[in-house]
Amino acid sequence: MVLSVFLLVVCYTRKTIVTDPIMIQVTVLIVYVFLYGRLYMVMTGLEREILEDPQIKNNNALEAALVTQSLIQMGMLLVLPMLMEIGLEKGFRTALGDFFIMQLQLSSVFFTFQLGTKAHYFGKTILHGGSKYRATGRGFVVRHSKFADNYRLYSRSHFVKALELGLLLVIYEVYGESYRNSSLYLFITFSMWFLVGSWLFAPFIFNPSGFEWQKTVNDWTDWKLWMGIRGGVGIQPENSWESWWDEEQEHLRYTSIRGRVLEILLALRFFVYQYGIVYHFDIAHHSRSLLVYGLSWCAVLVILIVPKIVSVRRLQMFHMNLQLPLRMLKGLLFLILLAVMIILFKFCGLTLSDLFASILAFMPTGWAFILVGQACRPCLHKLLWEPIKEVARAYDFMMGLLLFTPIAFLSWLPAVNEFQTRILFNQAFSRGLHISMILAGKKDGGASVN
């Protein structure tokens, strides 16, 4: 079964486990293998046949064994060396107290996130060679980091991977729910949901004043400005999304043919989503024909081509005022799309659940196109590079919006910011920071009155 990352990393806080990079890489790799194996079993119906087997159905002994395994999966046994070390030094009551305080301080979240940083750059080094320093820890810092800075630093190493794992867990839950006869899903996937949550939100949880409303508003303004500025010579990655995107592909410029081929082969895993989900559409009527898969590719091409047709930037090269024809074209395409949707709903059996399932199926396909296009950049630089760049910009904007929404909601709540400050700093420093914020507010108010 899957190797845990929940309390496994807690032991790292006391240096009681071996922090070998190979072990870290294997830990993350096993999570991927486990979830893609589960996805295969769910989509092919193999898991349903196993669970409906009379010898396995309502098997209390099997469920008891899996529950015990889930406790090991959450790292309970790996905590024992740390408890024994502290217990021998200070007493077992102190050891239990320290362990409980560590959890309240979210040390598991921090070191799970650090695990992802090491795994990402170690894996990149295996594929393409070279090395680059990335700080995996954080010292005593009280400066607020902008949302764009956190996204730029951790997007490819944590956020993308966490969203992929989260999508796998959602698909496993949605398409496995109808024939699951026990509550083992929570025990089996709890540690992986913990990993997903840590990789997505740890930079914002440990960001000073990360949930202060005014800073959140400023971060959103800065984020939109960063996404919209075009890159070019002399434009730093901190100031433009395009410059940052080019910098993220720097390792592909110096890699070998082997590295490019491996990148393409790894990107093909995203097509598994589309291939497995389209056959579960209600409009497919449980058909296993290749025609269903072929029609799904037609839908993908339409989704990718239509936005390019109505792109204003492509029409600007003619130096003509084409606003009216462009709006007429957009209206015509909208009417055609509406008519097609009505026909599909009325005569072909399309349902609302199919529309939501198509998002789960086609979004990873678009991301696979981006990864393949980046690996084949020398061949596509003059042909399809600009469309690939625009699609990548749209994906990054959607991922940023997905991350920013819960942050904005928590910032709107009055007590979250103060609670975060108490977690990050000690009581005396938290009180001083709170007083300084009040004084700063009075000073700004007095200045505005004057």
Image (spheres, rainbow, N blue to C red):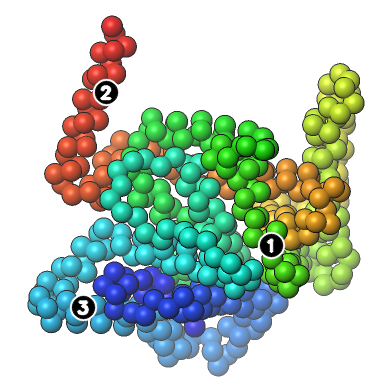
Residue 222 is at least partly visible in this image: yes
318 vs 165, nearest the viewer:
318
Few, some or many C-alpha atoms within 10 Å of disc 2 (few <14, some 14-19, many ≥20)? Answer: few
> Does 243 appear above or below 176?
above
On-image quarter of the C terminus: top left
Give how far across and how far down residue 63 sits, in percent: 44, 84
Mark 3 or 1 closer to N-term?
3
Mark 2 or 1 closer to N-term?
1
Query: What is the C-alpha distance between the residues marked 3 and 1?
Result: 47 Å
| Helix, strand or loop at mark 1 | loop
Residue 377 marker: none
Q: Residue at x 25, y 59 (%)?
A: 104
Residue at numbered disc 1: 254
Give how far across and how far down residue 288 sits, in percent: 82, 72
Residue 268 is at least partly visible in this image: no
Residue at numbered disc 2: 441
Give how far across and how far down residue 236 sits, in percent: 58, 40
Q: Amino acid at mark 2?
A: Gly
Mark 2 or 3 closer to N-term?
3
Report whether 207 appears left or right of 181. left
Residue at numbered disc 3: 83
Query: What is the C-alpha distance between the residues marked 2 and 1?
Result: 51 Å
Q: Amino acid at mark 1?
A: Tyr
